[in-house]
Image (cartoon, grey):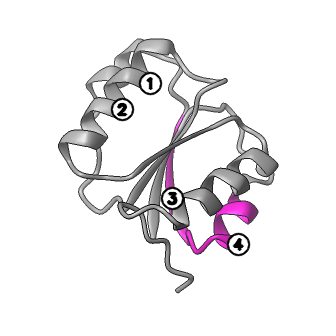
Amino acid sequence: MKALLVGADRLGNIPNTLENHGIKDYIHWTGRKKGMRKFDIPEEIDMIIVFYDFIEHNITEIVKQKAKQNNIPCVFSRRACSDLSRRLQDCKGCNVCLISNN
């Protein structure tokens, strides 16, 4: 599974948390600059994770809208491994997002 991470200048231990939830590959956008509003979501993305405490506000809305248009599951989390882990665990149970541990 490949995720697009939006927000957070540094990821710290987040890659370890992602791997524990079956996300082996990711693309990271810091989400701090207005120019990022024009970026297109890469086609090979299976999930979007938005770190809402470290992002330019309008980018949050744009990413949410683009995820919905492309039918891509979107998870909103603080940039804390514990919060991310809980949100990903909750996502496993939803009908839209089935995370595999491949």
Q: Which residue lies under the disc numbered 3?
A: 26
Q: Which residue lies under the disc numbered 2?
A: 63
Residue 70 is left or right of residue 7, and the answer is: left
Is residue 55 positioned above or below 16 on the image? above
Q: Does the magenta-highlighted stretch encompass residue 18?
A: yes
Q: Are marks 3 and 4 in contact (CB under 8 Å)?
A: no
First along the sequence among labels 1 and 3 = 3
Is residue 11 positioned above or below 90 on the image? above
Cα separation, mark 3 vs mark 4, equals: 13 Å
Q: Secondary structure at mark 4?
A: helix
Residue 60's mark?
1
Q: Tag 3: Cα neighbours inside 10 Å, few (<14), some, or many (≥20)?
A: some
Q: Which residues, given as a range, are shown in magenta? A: 15-29
First along the sequence among labels 4 and 1 = 4
34 and 64: which one is in front?
64
Q: Does the magenta-highlighted stretch encompass residue 86?
A: no
Q: Which residue lies under the disc numbered 4?
A: 20
Q: Amino acid at mark 1?
A: Thr
Is residue 52 positioned above or below 66 on the image? above
Q: Amino acid at mark 2?
A: Val
Q: Tag 1: Cα neighbours inside 10 Å, few (<14), some, or many (≥20)?
A: some
Q: Are marks 2 and 1 in contact (CB under 8 Å)?
A: yes
Q: Position of residue 24 (x, y in %)?
A: 56, 72
* Residue at 30% over, 42% down: 67
Q: Quadrant of residue 19?
A: bottom right
